[in-house]
Image: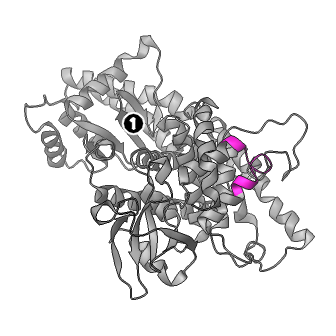
């Protein structure tokens, strides 16, 4: 076992204490808070009116016009409107619809009607028309049959040419990922899709900033909710994808990697999925201020001049300025604090200079560790050498209590294992392999599951290094050390990227 292995027993004894370290509340936006219940009440009123009057009746047209006006206001601020059932709650754009007891009727009605028809999600595109809304509600009014209720609704909408309002059947992602018998291939494909979408989204964010357009915060919430689902089921593929440093542009993939690693820490703290996703959103946006730092400074080989360093240090405040342009300040407060403070150390050093009595936001110690770990394991022109994942963890351990919150540091190290997923290792047989999955038994953490790699381009099957040899005679292979071997990067990527 290497030097890092000695700290795992201490990490195990310390980690449970961190579970209650902070409480987070789900995000909300002013527009969803105000207009969400109003839109759902409009749906409820329209259905009640259509039960009595023909769609062309004046009363029907009045209630329909009010409904479309509310939808137009929501779309103007949110981009599109998605209503989803999650564990008997109703979410709009992944934000819970909060209502008082007097106005809860329409919300409970919609949950019941969607459940009856096996609909998990209703999606209203910006181009949805009043005619399409009327046709959708008429189809939704039809009494569900006893067998293919979702199919009946889908066919009714198709026959009425409803294209801008879409429904999603209640099987899908949440059920798939929480099924204990889920196939690893399904998790791999879902992880690949979620990671790719998140990286593409960060590209959109950077372009939006360059063109002075607002950031699409609801989309960020949806993406991190998907990633949080996967983290809670089996995070190994996501961590493996984060270890592939040429997976995409560093500028975009670094933010996504930090988001995934931050959510992994939050999950190990025992926080809820919504709280994990909130941390994920804050981590996604932690470096948006770097959009305003010239590439010549970001990628300069060698030491930055004092003026260049001042410009680099400004990126945390520049991120705050960009995030403050989002209309809903309440929803963006966590990312603002993380952007501002993620280069502040546990002992108060770092930047920007910490004023007296300035509290560190509870997300910051989590994002700061994820940020440093991903940066240190990524080749960059200005860095003399790239650290292997286990050496990066050792750096975090040695700086716990100075740069890093010691409780979060120990939990992160325990979570990642002695040889994190994605690490290329050399075995005592001279073979090289990539770590696929951690061993959950503490005394066998130095014996993960690996896939053998070869310079000839062949990738072997999964091999559990904790499996004894024939007749129970010891272990056939052991890890000697971790290595950086760029010649094996393509094979390593093949272990985590879907074909």
89 relative position to 203: left or right: left
- Residue at screen point 29% across, 60% down: 185
Q: Provide residue 449's location: percent of width, then percent of height.
A: 40, 62
Q: Specify the quadrant of the image occupied by residue 360.
A: top right
239 relative position to 49: left or right: right
Colour mapping = one colour
Q: Dot 1: what SS?
A: helix
Is 469 rendered above or below residue 144? below
Pointer 1 local density, CA inside 10 Å: few below 14, some 14–19, many at least 20: some
Whether residue 54 appears in this view of the structure is: yes
User: Magenta span has 388?
Assistant: no
Considering every residue shown, the one lying at the far left of the view is 146
Report how many numbered discs are placed on residues in the image.
1
Whether residue 336 appears in this view of the structure is: no
The magenta segment:
396-407
Q: Which residue is mark 1?
A: 68
Q: In front here: 464 or 87?
A: 464
- Residue at screen point 35% across, 82% down: 458
């Amino acid at each position: 076992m290497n030097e890092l292995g000695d700290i795992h027993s201490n990490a195990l004894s310390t980690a449970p204490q961190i579970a209650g370290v902070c409480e987070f509340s789900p995000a909300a936006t002013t527009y969803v808070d105000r207009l969400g219940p109003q839109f759902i009440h409009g749906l409820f009123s329209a259905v009640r009116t259509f039960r009595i009057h023909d769609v062309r009746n004046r009363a029907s047209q009045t209630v329909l016009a009010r409904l479309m006006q509310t939808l137009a206001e929501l779309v103007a601020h949110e981009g599109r409107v998605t209503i989803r059932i999650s564990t008997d709650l109703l979410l709009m754009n992944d934000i819970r619809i909060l209502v008082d007891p007097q106005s809860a009727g329409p919300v409970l009605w919609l949950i019941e009607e969607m459940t009856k028809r096996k609909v998990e999600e209703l999606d209203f595109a910006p181009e949805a028309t009043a005619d399409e809304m009327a046709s959708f509600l008429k189809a939704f009014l039809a009494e569900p049959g006893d067998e293919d209720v979702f199919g009946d609704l889908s066919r009714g909408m198709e026959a009425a040419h409803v294209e801008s309002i879409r429904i999603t059947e209640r099987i899908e992602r949440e059920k798939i990922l929480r099924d204990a018998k889920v196939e690893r291939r399904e998790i791999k494909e879902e992880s690949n899709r979620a990671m790719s979408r998140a990286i593409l989204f960060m590209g959109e964010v950077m372009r939006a900033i360059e063109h002075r357009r607002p950031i699409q915060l609801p989309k960020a919430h949806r993406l991190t909710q998907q990633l949080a689902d996967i983290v809670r089921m089996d995070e190994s593929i996501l961590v493996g994808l984060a270890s592939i440093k040429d997976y995409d542009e560093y500028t975009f993939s670094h933010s996504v990697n930090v988001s995934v690693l931050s959510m992994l820490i939050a999950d190990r703290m025992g926080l809820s999925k919504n709280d994990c996703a909130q941390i994920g959103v804050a981590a996604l946006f932690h470096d948006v201020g770097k959009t305003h730092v010239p590439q010549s400074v970001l990628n300069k080989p060698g030491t930055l001049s004092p003026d260049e360093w001042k410009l680099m240090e400004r990126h945390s405040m520049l991120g705050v300025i960009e995030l403050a342009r989002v209309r809903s300040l309440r929803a963006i407060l966590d990312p603002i604090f993380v952007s501002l403070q993620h280069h502040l150390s546990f002992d108060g050093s770092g930047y920007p200079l910490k004023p007296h009595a300035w509290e560190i936001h509870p997300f910051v110690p989590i994002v700061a560790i994820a940020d440093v770990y991903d940066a240190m394991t990524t080749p960059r022109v200005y860095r003399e050498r790239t650290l292997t994942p286990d050496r990066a963890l050792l750096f975090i351990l040695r700086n716990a209590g100075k740069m890093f919150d010691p409780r979060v540091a120990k939990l992160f190290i325990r979570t990642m294992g002695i040889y994190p997923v994605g690490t290329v290792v050399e075995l005592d047989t001279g073979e090289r392999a990539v770590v696929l999955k951690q061993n959950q038994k503490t005394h066998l953490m130095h014996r993960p599951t690996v896939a053998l790699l070869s310079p000839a381009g062949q990738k072997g099957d999964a091999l559990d290094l904790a499996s004894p040899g024939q007749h129970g005679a010891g272990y056939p292979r052991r890890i000697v050390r971790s290595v950086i071997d760029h010649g094996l990067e393509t094979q390593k990527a093949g272990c985590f990227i879907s074909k």
